[in-house]
Amino acid sequence: MKKILIIEDEEPVRTGIKDLLELKNFKVFTAEGGAEGLKSAKENLPDLIICDIKMPGIDGYEVLKRINKEEILSSIPFIFLTAKTEMSEMRYGMNLGADDYITKPFMATDLYKAVEVRLNKSERVKKKGSPSKVTVDDAESKKNIGEHLFITEGNKPQFVKIHDIECITAFNEYTNVYLNNSKKLIIRKSLKEWESALPDSMFIRIHRSTIINFEHVDRVEKFYDRSYLVFLKNIKQPFIISQRYLSKLKKNLFF
């Protein structure tokens, strides 16, 4: 039976998470503050720690810093529980060595998925005999973080692999972000903002309302006169390439 420690100062939240995890047959320990949580971690050596950030006294950031200094605790997967969605807050926590975030309010499925992913990854690391967890200060972690974008759909923040983005189309004040797993995200972000965030070595605008990922292009076909259609690997509907962007696309796709 896997052991999980919850460090959360709000009793309803703490109890709710405990009840949800116990339904999945986890052995759950709880602490209502940072000091109590550190003590419980040393005594119970949990397989996973879920910790709120905003707490009186010792906050979540300080808890993680102290966890990382304890050799016996430093390899335990650590998930932050927070109501904050600012990129700076997320990046700071990742730099400290956090493995994931769960943003309040959340659905039970979000909690279960985060816990499952972190426990499974921890098991794989143990089987490989790897050392304790790495942080984004390590070269490989920097590489992995750099391959992701932090985006917010509604009030749900998440990291998305840049490579997984097939194309982005604009409508009104929003954009549709199509991923290669057939999932579509609706984000309040302009194409101009996307262009500044995405690497131009991988993405190109082909129309005033469309950006595509070179790596997901299946084929380009002549349409009429000097116009072309571009087909992406996982999207049935082709996209028209406007004359304004045609020369740049030809240069990058060699057609």
Image (cartoon, rainbow, N blue to C red):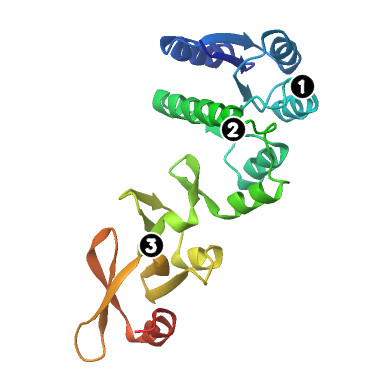
Which is in the foreground here, disc 1 or disc 2?
Answer: 2
Amino acid carrying label 1: it is Ile
Nearer the N terminus, badge 3 or badge 2?
2
The kind of secondary structure element at disc 2 is helix
Q: Quadrant of residue 173?
A: bottom left
Tell which residue pokes out farthest to the bottom in this image: 225
Which quadrant holds residue 31?
top right
Q: CA distance from mark 3 to mark 1?
A: 42 Å
Label number found at residue 58: 1
At label 3, which amino acid type do we have? Ile
Residue in front for this viewpoint, 249 or 72 = 72
Quarter of the image containing the C terminus?
A: bottom left
Residues packed near mark 1 inside 10 Å, few (<14), some (14 to 19) or many (20 plus): some
Q: Please, what is the three-letter code of the amino acid marked with disc 2?
A: Lys
Q: Which residue is mark 3?
A: 168
The crowd level at tag 3 (other Cα within 10 Å; few <14, some 14-19, many 20+) is many
Residue that badge 2 annotates: 128
> On the picture, is 210 further left or further right than 50?
left
Q: Residue at x 73, y 12 (%)?
A: 42
Label annotation for residue 171: none
Taking the image as drawn, is residue 54 in sight? yes
Q: Earlier in the sequence, mark 3 or mark 1?
A: 1
Label 3 sits on a secondary structure element that is strand
Q: CA distance from mark 3 to mark 2?
A: 38 Å
Crowding around mark 2 (Cα neighbors within 10 Å: few <14, some 14 to 19, many 20+) is few
First-in-chain label (1 vs 2): 1
